[in-house]
Image (cartoon, rainbow, N blue to C red):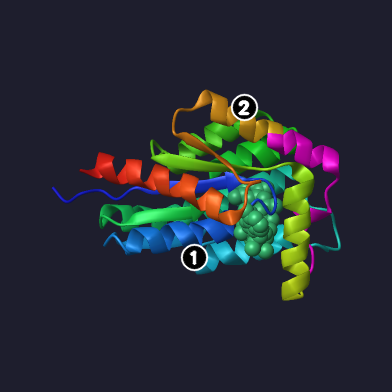
Amino acid sequence: MKNQGKFITFEGGEGVGKSTNIQFAAEWLKARNIDVVVTREPGGTQIAETIRNQLLKAHHDEPMSDLAELLLVFAARAQHLQALIEPALAAGKWVLCDRFTDSTLAYQGYGRGLDTAVILNLKALVQKDLEPHCTFLLEAPLELGMSRARGRADDAGEQVDRFETEKLDFFRKVQQGFSDLANQHKRFARIDASLPLTDVQQQIEQQLSRLMEQQG
Ligand code: T5A
């Protein structure tokens, strides 16, 4: 039977360096002849990116309900899994995904205060038994991540998105959510993302080497 690929997710608060380090990980793996797909959530396919636009759009004429937000996140995920993630894994590729369901538990669960049991039910419906092989949790003090995100957005001339307009207290709860999840699940690799980029990438390299060894 053909080797199944590996599913690796990158998680953490705003601006901790997920996008930067996912690109680094992809290049590192490609240099070792691994077939890699880089994707993100919400999004990753045409339909899921359309949902992302609505989720992140800062100004709607009506406020988005927390439940609508949750269901849209999972609608995008269902599409992303079927159209991109599952076929890539079945073809033996390594899928590197910028955010996944841990973000839903952290943002919609801890941040918005939606019932974790409801989120876990939706997770079971959408993901069935698929879990990431490894989840890199990039951790840095909130203020550092937010100032990095702001700096990057200013450089790129981007507007803030709907989540970035939330108050600090919301992001504290999100951060607590990620920390609790990392304490509960062995698949998490905690990365100190407050360090200079080369040190962050050294930690990521170590974890990728470990995953390649498991591959045999
Ligand atoms: N969301 C998502 C939910 O609410 N529920 C869900 O289920 C899901 C999947 C998505 C939003 O949607 C929410 C959460 C989010 O608010 P996003 O695009 O993933 O949006 O959100 P962000 O986390 O805001 O993504 P960013 O692109 O802002 O942050 P990254 O990717 O973590 O950071 P990155 O790599 O762009 O780095 C930011 C800047 O810092 C520099 C980089 O060069 C860049 O300029 N940098 C460093 N500088 C110094 N030292 C380091 N170690 C550095 N690392 C990065």
Rendering quadrant holding ligand 1: bottom right
- Give the magenta-colored segment's residue range: 159-175
Q: Is residue 127 above or below residue 35?
A: above
Residue reaching furthest bottom?
157
Crowd class of label 1 (few under 14; some 14 to 19; many from 20; radius 10 Å) = many
Q: Nearer the viewer, mark 1 or mark 2?
A: 2
Query: What amino acid is found at the position of numbered circle 1 in the picture?
Result: Thr
**Which residue occupies the foreground of this view, 144 or 14?**
144
Residue 104 appears left or right of 57: left
Q: Is residue 201 above or below residue 23?
A: above
Q: Is residue 103 above or below residue 86?
A: above
Q: Residue at x 47, y 38 (%)?
A: 125
First in sequence, mark 1 or 2: give its number: 1
- The quadrant in which the C terminus is found is top left
**Rendered location of residue 129, percent (x, y):** 38, 35
Location of mark 2 (residue): 180
Does residue 112 appear anywhere in the picture? no
